[in-house]
Image: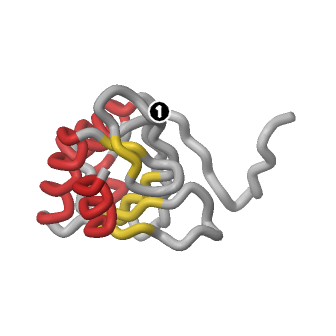
Amino acid sequence: MGLAVPPELEVDILPLREAPFPALAVDNVKTLLLLRDIQALMEAKKLGLPPTRVNLGNVHHGPMRKQVSTSVFLNAEEIEQLKRLNDAGWDIEARGVPSERPVTFSEMVERFGKG
């Protein structure tokens, strides 16, 4: 069963290197960008993604990762990468589904430190 997309919405699936980040930043169209991991987010920034709101939805458990929200596990390098984005004005939160209360970046850092 495919995803039904209303006709007024446009869906483009592009390789990260082909995404027109500078144009998206100035076109006044709300855009949802889905990325696989923090590394892809950092690459998107290098390719021109401007400071924006980032929701970490699901980042799975793995070696050296600590739980920072119900469904997000991060390692020290990812925390540092996100800290650089946060310090540059990016709005970073974590929540697995829209009905969850968002976990702020400062809460993630605190939980990481305790984990």
Residue drawn where x is 29% and y is 32% of the image: 64
Instruction: Identify the colour scheme used.
Output: secondary structure
**Which secondary structure lies at badge 1?**
loop
Tell me the quarter of the image containing the N terminus.
Answer: top right
Residue drawn where x is 33% and y is 37% of the image: 65
Tell me where residue 53 sits by quadrant. Answer: bottom left
Residue drawn where x is 77% and y is 43% of the image: 3
Question: Can residue 106 be seen in this snapshot?
Answer: yes
Q: Nearer the viewer, residue 74 or 17?
A: 74
| x and y percentages locating residue 12 in the rendered image | 55, 41
Q: Nearer the viewer, residue 61 or 94?
A: 61
Q: Residue furthest right?
A: 1
Residue drawn where x is 56% and y is 55% of the image: 96
Tell me where residue 104 sits by quadrant. Answer: bottom left
State whether residue 33 is above or below residue 105: above
| x and y percentages locating residue 9 in the rendered image | 65, 57
Amino acid on which disc 1 is placed: Leu
Tally of numbered discs = 1
Q: Is residue 37 left or right of residue 46?
A: right
Question: Can residue 26 be seen in this snapshot?
Answer: no
Tell me where residue 77 sits by quadrant. Answer: top left
Which residue is tagged 1? 14
Within-10-Å neighbours for mark 1: few <14, some 14–19, many 20+: few
| x and y percentages locating residue 23 in the rendered image | 32, 54
State whether residue 2 is above or below residue 9: above
